[in-house]
Image (tube, rainbow, N blue to C red):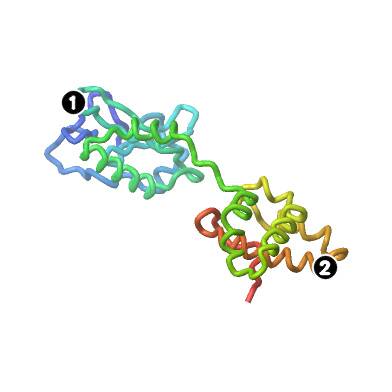
Amino acid sequence: MIRRLCVDECVGATGNLSPPMSNKAKKTSNRLTVLFVNSNKLAPGLYGDGNNLFLSVRPSGSRSWVFRFRERGGNRIRDMGLGTAGPDGVPLQAARDRAVALRADLRAGRDPIADKKAAAAAPEAPQKTFGDYAINDWLPVYAMGFKNPRSAKELKRVLEINAAPLFSLALDAIGKPEVLSVLTPIWTTKAKTARELRARLETILQAATPQHRLGENPLARQP
């Protein structure tokens, strides 16, 4: 039977909360089950799984994962949220894996809460836009194969005129709807230009993968 954590339960030297020892050996990790975590009959409280991982159940019935540890060099107990729990939340095994990783951080002398705050405060690197990549990264390399220097200028002009709606978009945000928005208007009126533009767009998006975009190339031809 899984007990709710009581206020008089102790914290071991490693920072792991555990019930008082008894003559009967108790399971010290992986105490919870998926069925238990997803049960709608749990009373409010903290339910220990071991390795500093707890299932927190609120009076409303909502639940979340908590990593509870003792602050190094003191007696202060700290809680770190690991996401929601339950059928639509973080799976039990994923929460366990995260707790094991955090315990390793504690043993290495790191503060997981401080690390989390630092990561959230760090500015995200701006995503590369299609225009920046196509003109400044891809075109100079692609143009090395041109015998006539004017060809690079002409290709640049074609992209700037016919693919202008894509220029401000992040490379990773470009999918089939976005490429169709620039190809469809000229597909029947400028068929040759449309075919050439399609080939160039496919090459650019492929060259940008995986460094600047993830997933499949929306213009890749199916085998």
Up-down relation of residue 90 to residue 163 (above or below): above
For the C terminus, give its image quadrant. bottom right
Pick the front one: 36 or 110: 110
- The spot of residue 32 in percent (x, y) is 33, 44
| Residue occupying image coordinates x 62% and y 65% | 203
For marks 2 and 1, the one nearer the N-term is 1
- Secondary element under disc 2, as helix, strand or loop, is helix
Residue 25 is at least partly visible in this image? yes
**Amino acid type, callout 2:** Ala
Quadrant hosting residue 155: bottom right
Q: Is residue 1 visible?
A: no
Q: Residues within 10 Å of mark 2 (few under 14, many from 20)?
A: few
Q: Residues within 10 Å of mark 1 (few under 14, many from 20)?
A: few
Residue placed under numbered mark 1 in the picture: 73
Q: Could you tell me which secondary element the residue under label 1 belongs to? A: loop
Q: Position of residue 125 (x, y in %)?
A: 50, 41
Residue 180 pos. (x, y %): 75, 58
